[in-house]
């Protein structure tokens, strides 16, 4: 389906109907569940998820995480026609709920002979976050050298996406526990991208082509 066809299909449903479809036991979220540019929820501030978490909202978060795992598996992704993703927000599914899923893999290293050394932990960050918010951040800004993309945007948009280099985020996990984590590097960029979605902000709203940049620790930072 094209982006316009997906938006048209989902615009005919209520948010309750959308969520009911997403959390069916037999359903796996795919690209036809993800709204594209122009869909209203991408530019609206989502509502906080009610606490304690309902079974439906817990299943929603789990389905979102399942999508990320599927999208990062080359065989499953090809079979299902998925674009690889490291994050997904409720707004991208046509839901006005502050729920995000983030899955950032660890990259393998290489020894002196060039042999691949598998990482001890598969993921740098693997978390479902409800009502996530940034409570503090660094003065220094940064951006990914490669720019950013988005599952809800079907075109490449070049430019450095300026974000905070480091952030502290508070959220509720799927067990209903309040958490606070400090993030830097790619994990920081990823979580900021998804929190932005819950606030109706797209990544290209932050693009800056004029700032003087330098590479530091694999990131671009403003000098």
Image: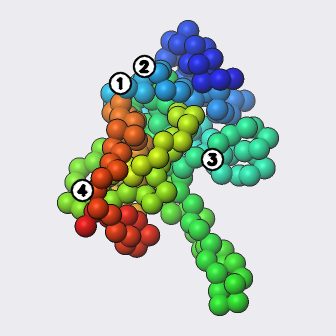
CB contact under 8 Å: marks 1 and 2? yes
In the image, which is nearer the foreground, mark 2 or mark 4? 2
In the picture of the structure, the residue carrying the numbered disc 4 is: 137
Q: Specify the farthest residue to the bottom.
A: 112
Mark before the other along the chain sequence, 1 or 3: 1
Q: Secondary structure at mark 3?
A: loop
Q: Which mark is residue 199?
A: none
Specify how the rendered protein is coloured: rainbow
Per the image, label 1 sits on a secondary structure element best described as: loop
Neighbor class of circle 3 (other Cα within 10 Å; few <14, some 14-19, many 20+) is: some
Q: Nearer the viewer, residue 188 or 219?
A: 219
Q: Nearer the viewer, residue 208 or 33?
A: 208
Give the residue number, with chain letter if any, for mark 1: 44
- Per the model, the C-alpha gap separating discs 1 and 3 is 25 Å
Q: Are marks 2 and 4 in contact (CB under 8 Å)?
A: no
- Give the spatial CA distance, label 4 vs label 1: 23 Å
Residue 56 makes an appearance in the image: no
Depth check: 184 or 97 in front? 184
Q: Which residue is mark 3?
A: 84
Give the class, few, some or many, for how many residues have Cα within 10 Å of label 2's Cα (few <14, many ≥20): some
* Marks 4 & 3, CB-CB < 8 Å contact: no
Return the disc, 2 or 4, that comes first in the chain's sequence.
Answer: 2
Residue in the image at 58% along x and 46% along y: 85
Label 2 to label 4: alpha-carbon separation:
29 Å
User: Looking at the image, which residue is at 47% across and 37% down?
Assistant: 89
Residue 19: image quadrant is: top right
Where is the C terminus found, in terms of image quarters? bottom left
Residue of label 2: 40
- Mark 3 to mark 2: distance in Å? 24 Å
């Amino acid at each position: 389906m094209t982006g316009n066809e997906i938006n048209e299909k989902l615009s005919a449903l209520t948010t309750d109907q959308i969520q009911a479809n997403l959390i069916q036991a037999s359903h796996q979220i795919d690209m036809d569940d993800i709204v594209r540019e122009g869909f209203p929820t991408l530019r609206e501030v989502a509502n906080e998820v009610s606490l304690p978490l309902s079974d439906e909202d817990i299943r929603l978060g789990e389905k979102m995480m399942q999508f990320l795992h599927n999208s990062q598996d080359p065989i499953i992704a090809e079979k299902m026609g998925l674009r690889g993703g490291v994050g997904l927000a409720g707004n991208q599914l046509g839901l006005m709920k502050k729920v995000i899923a983030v899955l950032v893999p660890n990259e393998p290293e290489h020894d002196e002979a060039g042999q691949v050394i598998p990482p001890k932990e598969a993921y740098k960050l693997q978390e479902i976050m409800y009502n996530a918010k940034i409570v503090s951040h660094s003065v220094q800004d940064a951006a990914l050298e490669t720019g950013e993309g988005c599952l809800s945007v079907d075109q490449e948009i070049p430019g450095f996406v300026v974000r905070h280099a480091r952030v502290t985020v508070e959220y509720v996990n799927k067990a209903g526990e309040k958490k606070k984590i400090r993030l830097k590097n790619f994990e920081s960029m990823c979580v900021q991208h998804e929190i932005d979605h819950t606030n109706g902000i797209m990544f290209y709203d932050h693009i800056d082509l004029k700032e003087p940049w330098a590479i530091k620790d694999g990131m671009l930072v403003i000098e």
